[in-house]
Amino acid sequence: MAQRKNLTLAIDLETLDEVRIYAARRGTTVNALVRSYLVELASQDARRKEARSEIRQMMHTGLVTVGERSWTRDELHQR
């Protein structure tokens, strides 16, 4: 199991009460909700970089093909 560090947050009581109810309805805790959110937040940048890399790879390997051009510029601009 990864090492954990305690974190202290300041939040208004009304919001905390609402979040406690939200967590209880889902069978979890406020702590677990915050932990899950922070893990998700931390991984977003890595996922974005991976997606960009995959898109660049597809562009370079030519996985996307475009058919032959069957129109002229003039045909496109006819009204």
Image (spheres, helix red, strand yellow):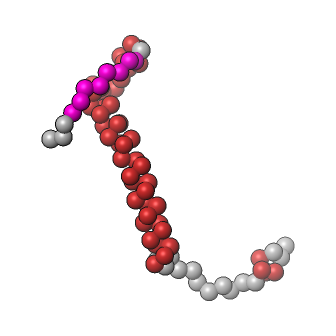
Q: Can residue 3 be seen in this view?
A: yes
Task: From the viewer's perspective, tell me whether residue 40 is left or right of residue 3.
Answer: right
Q: Where is residue 16 in the image (x, y as percent from the top left)?
A: 36, 18
Residue drawn at point x = 15 percent, y = 41 percent: 1
Q: Where is residue 37 in the image (x, y as percent from the top left)?
A: 35, 36
Residue drawn at point x = 34 percent, y = 26 percent: 22
Query: So how many labels did they put on this image?
Result: 0
Q: Quadrant of residue 20?
A: top left
Q: Position of residue 13 (x, y in %)?
A: 39, 13
Quadrant for the C terminus, please. bottom right
Any magenta on residue 6?
Answer: yes
Q: Which of 45 and 19 is in front in this view?
A: 45
Task: From the viewer's perspective, tell me whether residue 51 is left or right of residue 79.
Answer: left
Whether residue 15 is situated above or below residue 56 in the rendered picture? above
What stretch of residues is rendered in magenta?
4-11
Q: Nearer the viewer, residue 49 or 31?
A: 49
Any magenta on residue 51?
Answer: no
Whether residue 36 is situated above or below residue 55 in the rendered picture? above
